[in-house]
Amino acid sequence: MFSAEYLKSLGIEFILNYNRKSRKDEELEKRTGEDTLMAMRELMDRILSPLGIPYEQRDEIGSGDKISTRPVFQGILRELQENKYQAIAVKEISRLGRGSYSDMGVIYDLIVDKRIFIMTTWRIYDPKNPDDLRQIRFDLFMSREEFESTRQRLTGGRFNKALDGCWMAGKPPFGYDLDTKTRRLVINPEQAFVVRYLYDLWVNGVPIEDKKADVRHRALATYLRQQGVKTSTGKTHWKTDILEKMLDNPVYIGIVIYRRTETLADGTVVERPMEEHVIVPYAHERIIDLNTWRKAQAKNNNTDYIPRVKTDVATYELTGLCVCQSCGAKMVRNAQLQKYQSRIEGKDTTYHQKEFLVCPNGCWRLKYQPVVEQLIETLHYFRDLTSEEVESVLVPILADKPAPKGINPIQDIEQYVARRSAELKTRMKFIREKYELGKYDDEEFEESRAEIRAEQEKLDRMVFSQEFETQKAKPTISIDQVRGSFDSALTAFNLAVDTQDKNQVLRSVFEKVYVERTEKGSGSRASKFVVYPVIKHDFIYSDLLML
């Protein structure tokens, strides 16, 4: 065929052998049981070994449709670009790819620019030879046309089978198994029982305290987890998006829908126009009766009323306390079970629970325990205030409620100015402390201080414009009582035996706590945040603290 001397005269010193298992090879393996990839390697070995020129073999399993879906070939292109190899050996040119014309252009340009010789089982192609280049272009074009013909044939076959009611959408939905001979769905009794149970809870409600409560997807997922109902993977953690799809899937009333979506060139999945859908009723036995299905769809389509039902009664330290500073939504606890696989052989897989404080509107999320620790630090900070600081710091950040008897009310504008000024002082103190601890750099500190000073100047102008001349009576606070109250709260929190007791202590002190993330975390570096507490009136003015 060709000698080693001839190849060396062309400057070929290192050859790369690329072997790709095609769809045709997979079909052959199903018929004969032959390992086509191994056979291809052995064939190329018999051709390349006698040459005496060093070569490497790279194998890949996958369609030649796109370079982007072939990581091995992507690496080969980079190495050819770096002149590591002077020739690439393949069983036939179509093994290089049968993708789009843009992909073929990438391959062709690289071969020409770098003069990469192509070696097949029967000849060698020289990019400097016009006849060889013409043959390369022809083979690449024909391989693409063959690919398109094969794809159209397969698509047409799938389309005809779908019209006949066969399941052509991959993995069968939860509740069904796939009969591989007929390609039709058959009921899985155990899973079908779960599907019927799920629809019953959705339509008729979840039993809570001797009555049935109407719930939405999140509460339903929590209830299923509490009842130990298992998903298709054998776990009890139900995701709300999975429940939404199951409760809206017509497959459970015997309808098969094919060609509902399509995948674009960039991988984006989009909805096809309704006229392109293939809808086949009575394709298989239904799990859900039509009456239940209609009720479920009526509830799916009704977004006017969203019931607020708590099926998870667990209370944690910050339950009902924290508010997102950006949007004003109540922040919630989110727990995730993280899987850790040890790199040490013989070590078992471990699971760790990660807790986050999350804004339901997606503003941000923070690690849960650092926020708890910051509130405890806040209690220490308030307990250690000097007598001069108590009046200026604590009074303006009390909850916006009527003051106890004996305390004169203050006007709205005056109250706002005083409250906001105190918040700015507290925020400045926190920022200064963080700066001293090294959590803020000079630029961040100066920027934050400038913002606070600008807002304080606006408040000062507001006071001046209103010409407040009357000095209002201010409540008298006992410094000893304040310190005793915060000290009692700290003691009660430390002695609390569970998270519910700790939450009760914090809620006795704080009306609410605004949380603001000041810097997003990255990797092992945690996010930075600031808390703005609002203290209850009763906690400061009450003669008897009830914890």
Image: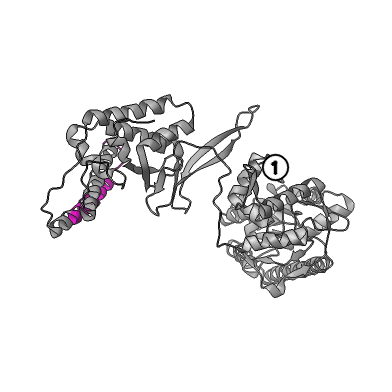
x, y percentage for residue 451? 24, 52
Residue at label 1? 229
On the image, the x and y values in percent for residue 178 come to 82, 53
Our reading of the magenta stretch's main secondary structure is helix
Crowding around mark 1 (Cα neighbors within 10 Å: few <14, some 14 to 19, many 20+) is some
Q: Residue at x 61, y 44 (%)?
A: 222
Residue 129 within the segment the image draws in magenta = no
Residue at the outermost front position: 405
Who is closer to the viewer here, 538 or 191? 538
Residue at 37% x, 50% y: name it: 325
Q: Determine whether, in the image, residue 410 is placed left or right of residue 521.
A: left
Residue 418 lies left or right of residue 235; in this view the side is: left
**Res. 1 in view:** no
Residue 506, above or below 133: above
The segment highlighted magenta reads: 436-459
The kind of residue on which mark 1 rests is Val
Residue drawn at x 23%, y 44% as measured from the top left: 425
